[in-house]
């Protein structure tokens, strides 16, 4: 199966309202172009350096999403064009994104990353930290970001019930946060969850954005 076939197959089964982020990290720009030529425009990258290099040579109508750990000193490298940053897990990072977006005269969409997996290594706020962060900040102090929702990664496991429980927890937290902090803000509407191995479960649990790499592009060589 070609990249184009994989994209078409995946998109043909996506329910309305679920957006596909094609995760192109570790794959060269030519591979991104195969998906682009198949009509896809939304791509995700996890390293600022790699994104910068690809963005410079790829078509300008690509909608770039940042999904990996983002160091604060790298925000300025992507602030001119990044569409959505999925991996915001501290107030300091949020502040820096607001600052760099202001310098560019832009509004950058962000998602708060919540740690839902059992692995200790994965980044993200705990559900409590996420709620506390929202209690502590005045959104009007950050006019150059828009908090559009939550992102999470389930445990890397064959235990489908565990994966489902983790996605369900994130969905429940999303609903609570929506009600408590964004009741009249239609922008707070995104739930970024689901990867190659678990996106069907994520969709059943309410995902609006799936981040799929391996299924489309094959295995990555690190
Ligand atoms: C790499 C990555 C993905 C894509 O994973 P696949 O298993 O290749 O689909 C999704 N989300 C994040 C945060 C990633 O780092």
Image (cartoon, helix red, strand yellow):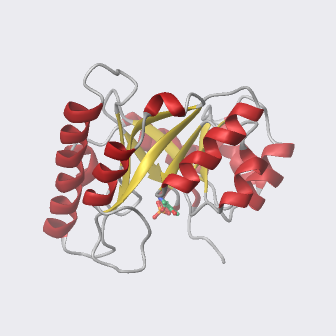
User: Residue drawn at (56%, 28%), measured in percent from left and top?
Assistant: 143
Q: Report whether 120 appears left or right of 66.
A: left
User: Residue drawn at (61%, 71%), measured in percent from left and top?
Assistant: 220
| Above or below for 158 versus 170 | below
User: From where the camera sits, is residue 64 visible?
Assistant: no
User: From where the camera sits, is residue 170 visible?
Assistant: yes
Q: Report whether 213 appears left or right of 174.
A: right
Question: Which image quadrant for residue 145?
Answer: top right
Between 28 and 113, the residue placed more toward the observer is 113
Image location of residue 99, percent across then percent down: 68, 40
Between 120 and 221, the residue placed more toward the observer is 120
Image location of residue 196, percent across then percent down: 41, 59
Question: Which image quadrant for residue 9?
Answer: top left
Q: Report whether 83 appears left or right of 158.
A: right
Q: How many marks?
A: 0
Q: Residue furthest right?
A: 57
Image location of residue 187, percent across then percent down: 40, 25
| Above or below for 36 versus 158 | above
Image location of residue 98, percent across then percent down: 62, 39
Question: Which image quadrant for residue 162?
Answer: bottom left
User: Residue drawn at (40%, 57%), measured in percent from left and top?
Assistant: 195
Q: Report whether 48 appears left or right of 16.
A: right
Quarter the N terminus occupies? bottom right
User: Residue drawn at (19%, 74%), measured in percent from left and top?
Assistant: 159
| Above or below for 162 versus 20 | below
């Amino acid at each position: 199966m070609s990249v184009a076939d994989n994209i078409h197959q995946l998109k043909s089964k996506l329910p309305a309202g679920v957006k596909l982020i094609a995760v192109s990290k570790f794959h060269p720009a030519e591979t991104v172009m195969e998906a682009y030529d198949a009509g896809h425009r939304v791509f995700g990258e996890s390293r600022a350096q790699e994104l910068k290099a690809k963005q410079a040579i790829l078509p300008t109508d690509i909608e770039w999403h940042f999904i990996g750990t983002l160091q604060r000193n790298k925000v300025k490298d992507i602030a001119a064009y990044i569409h959505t940053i999925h991996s915001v897990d501290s107030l300091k990072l949020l502040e820096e994104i607001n600052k760099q977006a202001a310098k560019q005269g832009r509004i950058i969409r962000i998602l708060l990353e919540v740690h839902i997996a059992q692995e200790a290594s994965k980044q993200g706020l705990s559900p409590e930290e996420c709620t506390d962060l929202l209690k502590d900040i005045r959104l009007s102090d950050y006019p150059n970001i828009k908090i559009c929702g939550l992102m999470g990664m389930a445990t890397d496991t064959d235990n489908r019930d565990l994966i489902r429980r983790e996605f369900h927890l994130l969905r429940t937290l999303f609903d609570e946060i929506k009600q408590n902090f964004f009741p009249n803000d239609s922008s707070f509407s995104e739930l970024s969850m689901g990867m190659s191995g678990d996106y069907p479960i994520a969709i059943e649990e309410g995902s609006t954005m799936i981040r799929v790499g391996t299924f489309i592009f094959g295995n990555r060589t690190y």
